[in-house]
Structures are given as C-alpha cells and as structure tokens.
Amino acid sequence: MKHRLAFAIVLFSTGNMLAQEKTAAPLQYTALHIKNAITIDGNLDEKEWANAPWTTNFVDIEGNKKPLPLQQTRCKMLWNNQSLYIAAELKETDLWATLTQRDTVIFHNNDFEVFIDPDGDTKNYYEIEINALNAVWDLMLNKPYSKGGKPNNNWNARGMKTAVALHGTLNNPTDRDTSWIVEIAIPWKDFTYDQAPQMGSTWRINFSRVQWQLDVINKKYNQRINPETGRPLPEYNWVWSPQGVINMHVPEQWGYLKFE
C-alpha cells in the first residue's frame, strides 16, 4: 500500500509539473516607439537600439524539459509609423551557411526565424527565416500545419530590408568565431496594414534559432551524420518563448509584442 501511495504521489506531482509547464504563460516584450528610421546594416549602432532592452536569452523549444542552449541568442525590437524593427544577436563559434537563393528551405542551414500573428487569431500568420549569408525565406500560412494549413511561398515581404553582420569568418573551420547579428525592418504594409498598430496594442510573435551539429571533413563544415540512419542528426531548436513541443506552428504559445 505504501508503494502504491508513493507511486500515486509521484504521478500526481509529475502531472502537476507537466500541466504547469504546458500552461506556462507566454513571454511578453514591450517595443519602444521611435521617430527616426533605422539604417539596416547589421551594426545596431543607433542610439535607439542602445535604449531598447534585450529579450531574455533563448531556451530550448520544449522549455525546461531540455538543457539550456549551448550558445546564447537574444533579440530586441523597435517600431515607428512605417516599420517594425527586429535585431538578433546569435553567439556562434562556427559561422556556417551555404544557401543563397531566396525562398529555399533556409532552416537546412543554421538560421534565425521570426513568426508573427498580427491579430492573434492563430490564422494568417507570417514566417521569416534568415541565414548567415542573409538568404531569406518568407512565407505566410493560413493556419498551422496540424490543422491543415498550407504555406504560401508566393507571399513576399516586398518592402522588408535585412542585413547580417558576421563577427568572425564564414565557413572557415580553422578559427573560432564570435557571433552574427541579424537586423530586419518590415513595413506595416507588408502585413496588409495601412498604418502602424495603435499605441498599447498587442501582437503575437516568437523567434527561433535552428542550430545543426557540425563536423569538419576535408577542411569544410558538414552536418553531423547519424551513422545508423545516414541522415543528419536532429537540429537544436532554441526559442524566445518556449513552445512546450518541438513545433513552432503552435501560435497560441507565441509571446506577446506590446507596442508602447
């Protein structure tokens, strides 16, 4: 009886922990309103960026189920009457990227990803992926894949500007690098909005970093292969607001972006 009681207590406690983790409140970031436009060059040297707070460091996509990421990632945001500005700092010891064509599957490289749902209804949301070569994949989904959603790769953020600054040498395994910076400006009209959000309004947003394990073969980076399958080992997924599952397409778990 004691063993059964102890087992029941363990199950109850575990269930509570899982429930708490599953229902953990999404994170919130308050973006400061600015008057001037930001130069998109990857340098983040404007005073407006200096005044913008960083997000908390990214965590594993499943939250506390997994160890902390091996390398730090964080973001910050600003906005004005024309655009939403996003900056990300990705610490990186081995800068690697191979894809250069727009709208290829960028997460086959290490990348930085943005997910935006302006009205928070979990439908008609946007995804943007960027690698260290500043190659971009932008698309729109009418709803999550799990609900039969279809990606629209014909959608392009036509007014969007992106820049990447590398602190190190790309595709050079003979040294150790420091980081790469992503800087993005997305005009409101690319979200089919005629004007900027109202002060105090809230959108849903999340950020993801896909990170592959690499080996050096013939002086080049290669994705580490699982010898049992002959395929690359699964990628790491590090995010700002944890999803609770290995799936970014659960918009109700995304964080909140407040415009102030």
Image (spheres, grey):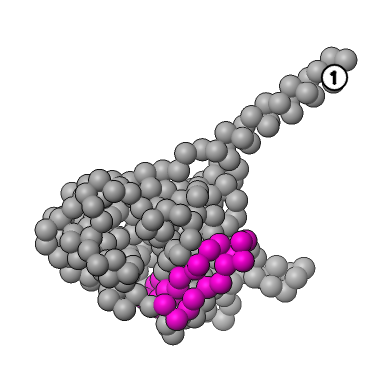
Taking the spot 49% from the left edge, 68% from the top edge, the residue there is: 141
Q: Which residues are magenta?
A: 129-155
Taking the spot 44% from the left edge, 85% from the top edge, the residue there is: 101
- Name the residue type under label 1: His
Taking the spot 23% from the left edge, 60% from the top edge, the residue there is: 196
Q: Position of residue 126 (x, y in %)?
A: 43, 66
The residue closer to the viewer here, 5 or 96, is 5
Q: Is the residue marked by circle 1 packed among few (<14), some (14-19), or many (20+) residues within 10 Å? A: few
Q: Classify mark 1: helix, strand or loop.
A: helix
Q: Position of residue 254 (x, y in %)?
A: 46, 51
Name the image quarter holding the N terminus: top right
Taking the spot 78% from the left edge, 23% from the top edge, the residue there is: 8
Quadrant position of residue 147: bottom right
Q: Position of residue 70 (x, y in %)?
A: 50, 52
The residue closer to the viewer here, 139 or 107, is 139
Q: Which residue is mark 1?
A: 3
